[in-house]
Image (cartoon, rainbow, N blue to C red):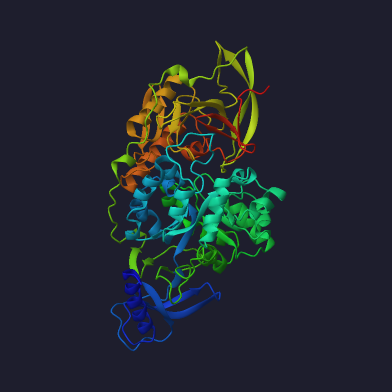
């Protein structure tokens, strides 16, 4: 028996003693209306806490005087909310900085798939990134990234996680699952990825899915491979097809992926059983969290759509904990679980008045009150954006022969990360394809940024609406090379070089000069500045994009997904245009 077990043994005896009222509670929260997600009841009671855990739920007060007593003021006691799937890097904040944004909104646990930083910095970078997360005023659990790189042979990444690295990460105490695995790995019977599923299941951990666009036999095969859930549903029909096969469904509401209305609207209309439905954000910028909320937004919107408050709360708490086999730790306010809960005046619209983690007050009246630890990230996470060679303006042109070309175009779908494969006929002048401003067809480039090969992928995109200048970003799933869209080749080169100078971020260029920039120097993905500074700079680059004609509310989130080689129909990586469903590089021109 190790020292850690002996320490826990002593704690457990004290907790049992406090439950028997043989020794004092550390904290008594009296006079609450407890939301019991197991029974579906709301109970007037008191909550007793010892050693960071709930030990009693009782309407009678203990005989021994607790060390601390807090008046719950007859507020509702709601389990801390859980984000079932999030790429923390796309909040643009480090884990310590993120606390200020999510904890006051009632989120006490994140289940993160850190594939972004893993693709940039590999195993060592990931381990450095998660060092110290146990000191945060909220919980982080790891969904071990299964696809680093996401599309081997179709993209260039900075790091890779093979089977051995994945097994090492699955053995971490904080690891709860194998992270999302796309259908291509199942369809091609990839030994590496099937072995990762086996490794997770052998450890009693689930394997997360990414079953975008699957139906019929393909969806059955995907479930047969041992994938346990999906967060990519955009229609109720897709949601129901997954529930029928025993897959869990995470209803997502991010910055550019807005799925709550369609999915929960269908659930309410059809009276669908919700026990295997959860909530997640997947990818949500901090400014959007500040503006509308985090998981509490998903819950509140679901209630507005007609879902019973108890059902919506379960989806954000118990359902997630049970799905990931951590219900013995969290997901309810019950004896033995961590004392993570919210006090709020209403369950019809959850606005936390006080938030507790480990029985300690961490947020009050919309403000973080807990101390946040400083995590000193190593310098090698700050120097990851490096070009293979000096760029020239002409590298931001698309050559073609003849007077015109019929070409494939990535057609954005507002509010979704999926896109359509469209066709367009464009003029060719002096051997170069010309953009079609009238029909909003613009050139797009993906520039390799790991100083490995100097690749530049070339494509065409519809939906950004630019009539001038260029926008670019180093957040481009999942390889995170630099993606740039624009009308002027010089502006596009200036945009890319500006991101190299700042070691990543989002930038808008007009007439050869930087109009606005948000530096993201930590792996080219995150800022270490205060959240208010990040929000202000994000608002500035969004506004600058609007002045170029861009109609999108979240243009840089949209930009980050158009290079993803696993989301249909098309993606653009540094190696070229990707036919996602057929897992291959295709020519831009249509013969």
When the figure is inspected, residue 324 is found, relative to residue 473, above or below; the finding is: below
Is residue 405 or residue 78 the one in the foreground? 405
Residue at position x 34%, y 76% from top? Answer: 11
Q: Is 19 on the left or on the right of 243, as rendered? A: left
Is residue 387 or residue 531 the one in the foreground? 387
When the figure is inspected, residue 280 is found, relative to residue 48, above or below; the finding is: above
Q: Is 199 on the left or on the right of 53, as rendered? A: right
| Residue 563 percent coordinates (x, y) | 52, 35
Is residue 286 or residue 553 the one in the foreground? 286
**What is the count of numbered marks?**
0
Asked if residue 382 can be seen in this view, the reply is yes
| Residue 84 percent coordinates (x, y) | 50, 57
Quadrant of the snapshot with the C terminus: top right
Q: Is 562 on the left or on the right of 351, as rendered? A: right
Quadrant for residue 118, please give it: top left
Asked if residue 73 can be seen in this view, the reply is no
Residue at position x 64%, y 24% from top? Answer: 424
| Residue 37 percent coordinates (x, y) | 52, 72
List the single residue furthest toward the right. Answer: 216
Residue at position x 54%, y 25% from top? Answer: 442
| Residue 248 percent coordinates (x, y) | 60, 59
List the single residue furthest toward the bottom. Answer: 63
């Amino acid at each position: 028996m190790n020292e850690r077990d002996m320490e826990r043994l002593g704690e457990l005896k004290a907790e049992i003693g406090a439950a028997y009222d043989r020794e004092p509670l550390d904290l008594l929260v009296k006079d609450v209306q407890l939301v019991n997600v197991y029974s579906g009841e709301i109970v007037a009671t008191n909550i007793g806490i010892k050693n960071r855990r709930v030990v009693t739920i009782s309407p009678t007060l203990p005989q021994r005087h607790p060390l601390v007593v807090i008046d719950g003021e007859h507020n509702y006691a709601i389990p801390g909310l859980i984000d079932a799937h999030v790429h923390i890097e796309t909040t643009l904040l480090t884990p310590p900085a993120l606390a200020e944004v999510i904890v006051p909104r009632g989120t006490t646990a994140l289940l993160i798939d850190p594939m972004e930083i893993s693709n940039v910095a590999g195993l060592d970078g990931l381990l450095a990134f998660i060092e110290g997360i146990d000191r945060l005023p909220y919980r982080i659990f790891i969904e071990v990234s299964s696809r680093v790189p996401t599309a081997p042979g179709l993209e260039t990444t900075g790091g890779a996680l093979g089977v051995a690295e994945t097994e090492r990460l699955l053995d971490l105490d904080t690891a709860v699952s194998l992270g999302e695995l796309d259908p291509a790995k199942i369809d091609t019977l990839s030994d590496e990825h099937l072995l990762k599923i086996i490794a997770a299941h052998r450890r009693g951990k689930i394997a997360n899915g990414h079953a975008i666009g699957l139906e019929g036999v393909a969806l059955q095969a995907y479930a047969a491979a041992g994938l346990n859930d999906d967060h990519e549903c955009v229609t109720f029909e897709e949601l129901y097809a997954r529930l029928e096969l025993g897959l869990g469904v995470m209803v997502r509401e991010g910055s550019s992926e807005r799925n709550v209305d369609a999915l929960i609207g269908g659930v309410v209309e059809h009276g669908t059983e919700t026990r295997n439905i959860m909530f997640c954000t997947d990818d949500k910028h901090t400014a959007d969290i500040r503006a509308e909320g985090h998981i509490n937004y998903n819950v509140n919107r679901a209630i507005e759509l007609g879902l019973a408050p108890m059902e919506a709360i379960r989806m954000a708490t118990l359902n997630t904990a049970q799905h990931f086999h951590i219900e013995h730790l969290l997901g309810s306010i019950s004896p033995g679980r961590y004392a993570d809960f919210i006090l709020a005046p209403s369950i019809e619209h959850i606005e936390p008045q006080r938030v507790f983690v480990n029985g300690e007050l961490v947020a009050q009246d919309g403000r973080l009150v807990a101390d946040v630890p400083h995590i000193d990230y190593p310098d090698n996470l700050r120097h990851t954006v490096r070009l293979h060679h000096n760029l020239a303006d002409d590298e931001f042109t698309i050559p073609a022969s003849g007077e015109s070309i019929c070409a494939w175009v990535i057609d954005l779908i507002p509010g979704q990360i999926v896109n359509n494969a469209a066709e367009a006929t464009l003029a060719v002048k002096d051997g170069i394809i010309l953009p079609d401003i009238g029909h909003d067809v613009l050139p797009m480039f993906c520039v390799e940024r790991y100083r490995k090969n100097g690749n530049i992928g070339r494509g065409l995109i519809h939906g950004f609406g630019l009539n001038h200048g260029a926008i670019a970003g180093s957040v481009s799933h999942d390889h995170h090379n630099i993606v740039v869209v624009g009308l002027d080749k010089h502006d596009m080169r200036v945009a890319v070089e500006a991101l190299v100078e700042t070691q990543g971020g989002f930038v808008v260029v007009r007439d050869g000069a930087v109009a606005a920039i948000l530096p993201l120097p930590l792996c080219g993905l995150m800022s270490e500045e205060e959240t208010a500074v990040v929000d202000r700079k994000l608002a500035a680059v969004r506004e600058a994009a609007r002045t170029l004609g861009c109609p999108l509310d979240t243009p840089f989130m949209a930009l980050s997904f158009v290079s993803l080689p696993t989301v249909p129909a098309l993606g653009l990586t540094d190696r070229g245009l990707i036919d996602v469903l057929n897992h291959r590089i295709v020519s831009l021109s249509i013969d």
